[in-house]
Image (spheres, rainbow, N blue to C red):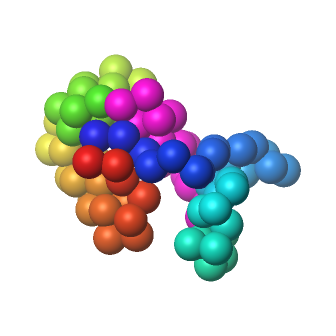
Amino acid sequence: MKIQNGYMLREIGGESIVVPVGARTVDLRGIIKLNATAAFLWKMMEKGCTQQELVEGLLEEFEVDEATAVSDVENFVETLRNNNLLDE
């Protein structure tokens, strides 16, 4: 799974913000602000990865148990899917 083309993650004022580019500027109404965990997952998904790789990445990067990592990844992926930000 991968983030759709046309969206970039930028650091603005110490915050992680998703910015649409090109034709995507008409698709996104508002701002997407990501916390540290979501920004980490977004960066992994820009390159393309599996859901299991996302879980493994969280376990390596953050002090979190596996059940929490699985739940966080599932929720994040579902949010991206619901907002048409995934290229599956």
Q: Residue at x 32, y 70 (%)?
A: 82
Give the residue displayed 22% in from the left and 53% down from the top: 74
> Residue, x 84% and y 50% (percent of image)?
13
x, y (%) of residue 58? 34, 32
User: For residue 46: magenta?
Assistant: yes
Above or below 29: residue 58: above
Residue 81 at x, y = what percent? 31, 62
User: Magenta segment, principal secondary structure?
Assistant: helix
77 sits to left or right of 21: left
Foreground residue among 85 and 26: 26
- State the image quarter where residue 2 is shown: top left
Residue stretch in magenta:
32-48
Residue 35 image position (x, y, % from top left): 55, 52
The question of residue 49 being in magenta is answered with no
Name the one closer to the observer, 2 or 42: 2
Return the residue nearer the eye: 30 or 40: 30
Confirm whether residue 63 shows in the render.
Answer: no
Residue 74 visible (yes or no): yes
> Vertically, is 12 above or below 27?
above
